[in-house]
């Protein structure tokens, strides 16, 4: 199943917040009992809990790829059904591969197609990719929202995870209910309004949407609709 965690702050050095990301990972350990992975940079910290299914060595996360002097790092939960087709197309365009994992295919697909990667994917996924050169986080969720992705913003920090309880491990984030949260819980539960959860100021990335977080703030965009 796997699970992802992370936080970004573009205004201060957060690379020393190792205990925070470890606590966040611990909260979702059932999603990935086989392996912990971490990535630390000045303005971003990423975590991953892995359930090993394919390529134990080559599929480790967070996964980093350097291309044209730009560093890209991914955390990903999901499965791509068109992995082989994407890999073949990337090979035709000069890319090489060191593993059999769909994680590497997804990461290099983003490097090649950029934001348009979501138009190429067939599968179920929740992922985030950090572009070190642009100081920008790209994140996306599959068409029907099979895989989860939650986030909040607090004190210029974007915090995200596969599960809300990991976000609540971040210092200062509180599980507050407001009128809408109570309505979601008792009026609709266990269903909920797309994009909204029971806790105040914690959000769900809607199915078929991607997001970009950079110095301009958060930009969300719908890339697919059912017809």
Image (tube, helix red, strand yellow):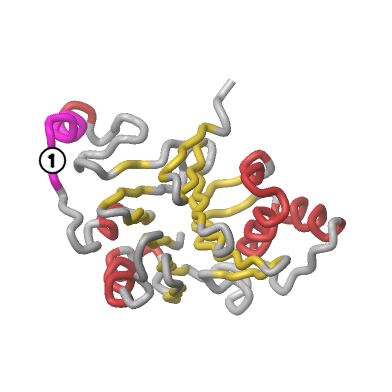
Which residue is painted at 42% across and 43% down in the image? Answer: 218
* Image location of residue 116, percent across then percent down: 66, 42
Query: Badge 1: few (under 14), some or many (20 or more) residues near its Cα, within 10 Å?
Result: some
Looking at the image, residue 101 lies above or below residue 112? below
Which residue is painted at 27% across and 44% down in the image? Answer: 202
Where disc 1 sits, the SS reads loop
Residue 122 shows in the view? no
Q: Is residue 218 magenta?
A: no
Front in this rendered view, residue 132 or 193? 132
Q: Quadrant of residue 109?
A: bottom right
* Image location of residue 164, percent across then percent down: 28, 52
Question: Magenta region, mostly helix, strand or loop?
Answer: helix
**Horizontally, is 153 left or right of 31 in the view?**
left
Looking at the image, residue 129 lies above or below residue 148? below
Which quadrant is home to the C terminus? top right
Start and end of the magenta stretch?
176-186
**Horizontally, is 193 left or right of 43 in the view?**
left
Read off the residue under disc 1: 177
Front in this rendered view, residue 101 or 132? 132
Task: List the single residue furthest toward the right.
Answer: 92
* Image location of residue 57, percent across then percent down: 60, 79
Q: Is residue 184 magenta?
A: yes
Which residue is painted at 53% across and 37% down in the image? Answer: 143
Q: Quadrant of residue 206?
A: top left
**Horizontally, is 83 left or right of 74 in the view?**
right
Task: List the single residue furthest toward the top.
Answer: 227
Residue 182 shows in the view? yes
């Amino acid at each position: 199943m796997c699970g992802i965690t992370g936080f970004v702050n573009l205004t201060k050095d957060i690379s020393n917040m190792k205990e925070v990301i470890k606590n966040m990972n611990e909260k979702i350990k059932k999603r990935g009992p086989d392996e912990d992975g971490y990535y630390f940079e000045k303005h971003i910290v990423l975590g991953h809990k892995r359930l090993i299914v394919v390529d134990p060595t080559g599929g480790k996360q967070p996964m980093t790829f350097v291309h044209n002097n730009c560093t890209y790092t991914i955390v990903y939960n999901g499965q791509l059904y068109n992995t082989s087709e994407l890999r073949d197309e990337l090979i035709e365009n000069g890319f090489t591969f060191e593993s059999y994992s769909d994680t590497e295919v997804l990461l290099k697909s983003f490097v090649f197609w950029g934001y348009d990667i979501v138009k190429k994917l067939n599968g179920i996924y929740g992922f985030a990719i950090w572009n070190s050169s642009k100081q920008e986080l790209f994140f996306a969720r599959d068409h029907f929202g099979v895989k989860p992705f939650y986030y909040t913003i607090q004190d210029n920090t974007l915090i995200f995870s596969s599960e809300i309880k990991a976000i609540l491990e971040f210092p200062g984030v509180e599980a507050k209910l407001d009128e809408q949260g109570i309505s979601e819980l008792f009026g609709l539960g266990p269903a909920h309004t797309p994009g909204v959860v029971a806790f105040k100021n914690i959000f769900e990335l809607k199915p078929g949407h991607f997001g970009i977080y950079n110095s301009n703030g958060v930009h969300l965009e719908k890339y697919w609709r059912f017809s």
